[in-house]
Amino acid sequence: MPLLVAATAAACCCCGLLLFCLRGSGRGRRPPRGFMAPPKRLLFRLAYNLYSRTQLGYLFHRRQVKRARQRFPQGHSIAHPMVFSGVKVVPIPVLSDNYSYLVIDTDAGLAVAIDPSDPLAVQASLEEEGVSLEAILCTHKHWDHSGGNKALKQRHKSCLVYGSACDRIPELTNPLTDGDRITIGRLQFQAFFTPGHTVGHMVYVLDGKSGDAPSCLFSGDLLFLSGCGRMFEGTAATMLASLDAAAALGDDTLLWPGHEYAEDNLTFAAVVEPENATRERKFQWVMQQRLERRCTSPSTLGEEKEYNPFLRTHSRELHSALSLQHASDEEWSHFRARVLEEVRRRKDLFKGR
């Protein structure tokens, strides 16, 4: 019993620290007299390490999953499957704004789960579709993307778990390197190493030939509609290289991100590029979708290049809006990394809603 009490107390402390650092709780409260608060960045790093590297982070994740199930019993958004020839992509709204995905070979009844955060939600989708889980593709180690791996692996014994060996993916059975290919039934995926958000972040591209359709990019926390992930474990140069790798895919590639951030991201994009008419049209569409709680995915990479500031580090208009100038003796890639770093810094400070 004392051990249980101690563990519970430790979990509560961890959760409190995470909430303080990640959500800014405690603002307006004075610290006790004689208490010198450590810098916010130090607190943030401490909380981040607890979340991403320890069992306390998993306990925090489980609490968040439980709360989200109570708050959103049907999911945070209304999402509809996209059906191609013999292939079906099923978005699964989980937690407060995450998406997991099932990609199904409809002829063979085989499914691949991508970033199965909530195992109950993923299992319910498997049962509704009447398919068997053959593999899990995990983009990175964060619990809101990998938290369901263990429970699903226990239930589906032959299920393989793919991901980067650099990222401590739970239940990993098949470590991947850049460019590796994965075939499940008719489904053909290629994995790309895209560090920056974490040291081992990977994205997965479903070859359009699998279903006579455009290719599909499952981007985890690398790329969102009009946004990109925070650079928790990488430099701006590292993240720029990863974003460039994604942008190099075909413009008709469908983007399926790990979060529903479209409204906030497009609101921020208006601040850094207020004259972007394409962004404004997309924003009006997104506002209507969110008014009806509808999922805003997928977009296309071609669209993203028009309004996503994180993919527009080459844009003269963006440079001017940020008051950044390319020095004559500065390498172009170095300058673009500076642009990305400034956009990310402004986004981290942005209070859109």
Image (spheres, grey):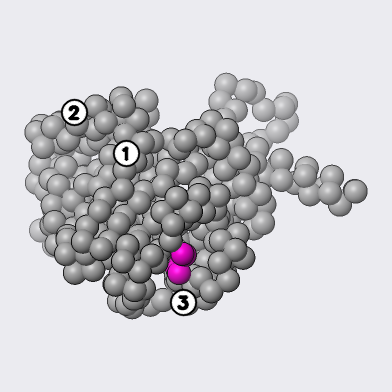
Q: Is residue 212 magenta?
A: no
Residue matched to label 3: 175
- What secondary structure is found at the residue carrying circle 2? helix
Against 81, residue 96 (above or below) is: above
Q: Which residues are magenta?
A: 132-136
Measured in 3D between alpha carbons, the distance from the residue under mark 2 to the one under mark 1, in whole angstroms, is 14 Å
Position of 258 with respect to 69 (left or right) is left
Q: Residue at x 13, y 56 (%)?
A: 252
Type of amino acid under label 2: Gln
Q: Closest to the observer: 113 or 84?
A: 84
Helix, strand or loop for disc 3:
strand
Dot 3: few (<14), some (14–19), or many (≥20) neighbours within 10 Å? some
Residue 95 placement (x, y as % from top left): 50, 41
Determine the image quadrant of residue 329: bottom left
Q: Position of residue 294 (x, y in %)?
A: 31, 34
Secondary structure mostly seen in the magenta stretch: strand
